Image: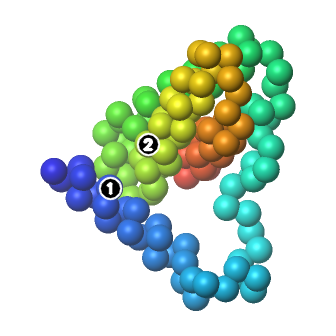
């Protein structure tokens, strides 16, 4: 229960910080990208399904390890939140890849969320 409460507080803090002053004004809002891979990620550009599966599994395994680490669960940085998002997105991307289907949305999210996780780790 303590972990759930911490996650809810972290997500709420992210939402409050990220939306300050620009709730409905998209045109004049912040110009920085939410994610460096907005659009097409390196994963989507890879046409080799076998290689793509390996890359997605690598990102997913790293995200799962971070999401299970007490170091990041108890951290004040949002690493745990991004690790949790990355493991879900990468898991879904991998599920589609098992049927030889490249779901570009989940591949983009997988790489984006993993990159955000790594960014907050340093």
Residue 68 appears at what percent x and percent y? Answer: 35, 34
Q: Say what secondary structure mark 1 lies in.
A: helix
Q: Quick one: 33 or 105, which is closer to the camera?
A: 105
Picture quadrant where residue 28 is located? bottom right
Residue 117 appears at what percent x and percent y? Answer: 55, 46
Dot label at residue 86: none
Dot label at residue 7: 1
Picture quadrant where residue 12 is located? bottom left
Q: How many marks?
A: 2
Residue appearing at x 70%, y 80% in the figure: 26
Q: Quick one: 31 or 98, which is closer to the camera?
A: 98
76 on left or right of 114: left
Q: Is residue 122 visible?
A: no
Dot label at residue 84: 2
Packing grade of label 2 (10 A; few <14, some 14-19, many >=20) is: many
Q: Is residue 64 above or below residue 79?
A: above
Q: Is residue 67 above or below residue 51?
A: below
61 on left or right of 70: right
Residue appearing at x 44%, y 31% in the figure: 64
Residue 20 appears at what percent x and percent y? Answer: 54, 83
Q: Are marks 2 and 1 in contact (CB under 8 Å)?
A: yes
């Amino acid at each position: 229960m303590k972990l759930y409460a911490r996650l809810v507080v972290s997500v709420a803090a992210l939402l409050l910080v990220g939306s300050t002053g620009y709730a409905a004004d998209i045109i004049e809002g912040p110009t920085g990208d939410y994610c460096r891979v907005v659009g097409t990620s390196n994963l989507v550009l890879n046409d080799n399904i076998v290689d793509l599966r390996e890359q997605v599994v690598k990102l997913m395994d790293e995200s799962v390890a971070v999401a299970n680490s007490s170091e990041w669960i108890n951290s004040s940085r949002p690493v745990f939140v991004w690790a949790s998002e990355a493991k879900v997105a990468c898991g879904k991307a991998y599920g589609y890849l098992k049927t030889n289907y490249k779901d570009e949305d989940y591949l983009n999210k997988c790489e984006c969320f993993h990159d955000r996780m790594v960014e907050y780790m340093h």
